[in-house]
Image (cartoon, helix red, strand yellow):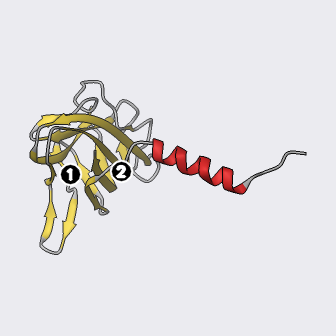
């Protein structure tokens, strides 16, 4: 019969946890829950506050860092099948890989004639090396091939 030693198991767990890297630091967490419709390229609201909504948020790093960016939203595209929606995460005005690629698809119509039949939660996670200081972040939404794009319940996170 195997004998389980609680003290040894607790010690092993403690050693394992202390050997792991330190926790990530949250640099930005923002959300916007209202639906946003796009028939042409435009910036998505990424924050709703008491003073109004904002297309731009900022995060700050004290030194050069590799940051992780996560964008998640409910997305749908209306159309007959060839329509799709792409998003581009912009940091200081420059597109972040992989969202800056020409063939990037965030969601597609797949024959959905209304937003109610073709929606789904989609997420992009990207890494980016940034210099010290303040950095602006935006999300650009682009409908393709004549469809209408709908984004809502979005969340944008940045951490290092």
Quadrant for the C terminus, please.
top left
Going by the picture, which residue comes out furthest to the top? Answer: 102
Report which quarter residue 149 is drawn in.
Answer: top left
Place of residue 30 in the rendered image (x, y in percent of width and height, measured from the top left): 26, 59
Q: Which residue is drawn at the image coordinates 21% and 66% (left, top)?
A: 48
Let me know if residue 85 appears in the view. no
Q: Disc count in the image?
A: 2
Camera-side residue of 58 and 76 = 58
Place of residue 92 in the rendered image (x, y in percent of width and height, measured from the top left): 9, 41
Q: Which residue is drawn at the image coordinates 14% and 42% (left, top)?
A: 63
Q: Which residue is drawn at the image coordinates 14% and 69% (left, top)?
A: 52
Camera-side residue of 65 and 84 = 65
How many other residues sit within 10 Å of disc 2, few (<14), some (14-19) or many (≥20)? many
Disc 1, disc 2: CB below 8 Å? yes
Read off the residue under disc 1.
44
Camera-side residue of 130 and 39 = 130
Dot label at residue 23: none
Dot label at residue 73: 2
The residue tagged with tag 2: helix, strand or loop? strand
In three-dimensional space, the C-alpha distance between marks 1 and 2, rounded to whole angstroms, equals 11 Å
The residue tagged with tag 1: helix, strand or loop? loop
Camera-side residue of 133 and 7 = 7
Place of residue 59 in the rendered image (x, y in percent of width and height, measured from the top left): 16, 52
């Amino acid at each position: 019969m195997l004998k389980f030693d609680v003290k040894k198991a607790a010690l092993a767990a403690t050693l394992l946890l202390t050997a792991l890297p330190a926790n990530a630091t949250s640099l930005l967490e923002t959300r916007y829950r209202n639906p946003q419709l796009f028939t042409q390229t435009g910036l998505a609201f990424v924050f709703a506050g008491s003073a109004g909504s904002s297309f731009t948020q900022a995060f700050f790093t004290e030194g050069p860092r590799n940051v992780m960016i996560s964008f998640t939203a409910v997305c749908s595209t209306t159309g007959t099948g060839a329509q799709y929606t792409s998003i581009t995460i912009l940091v200081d005005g420059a597109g972040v890989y992989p969202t800056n690629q020409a063939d990037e698809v965030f969601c597609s119509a797949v024959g959905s004639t209304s937003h109610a039949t073709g929606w789904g939660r989609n997420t992009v996670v990207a890494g980016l090396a940034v210099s010290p200081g303040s950095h602006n972040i935006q999300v650009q939404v682009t409908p393709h091939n004549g469809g209408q794009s709908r984004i809502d319940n979005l969340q944008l996170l940045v951490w290092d």
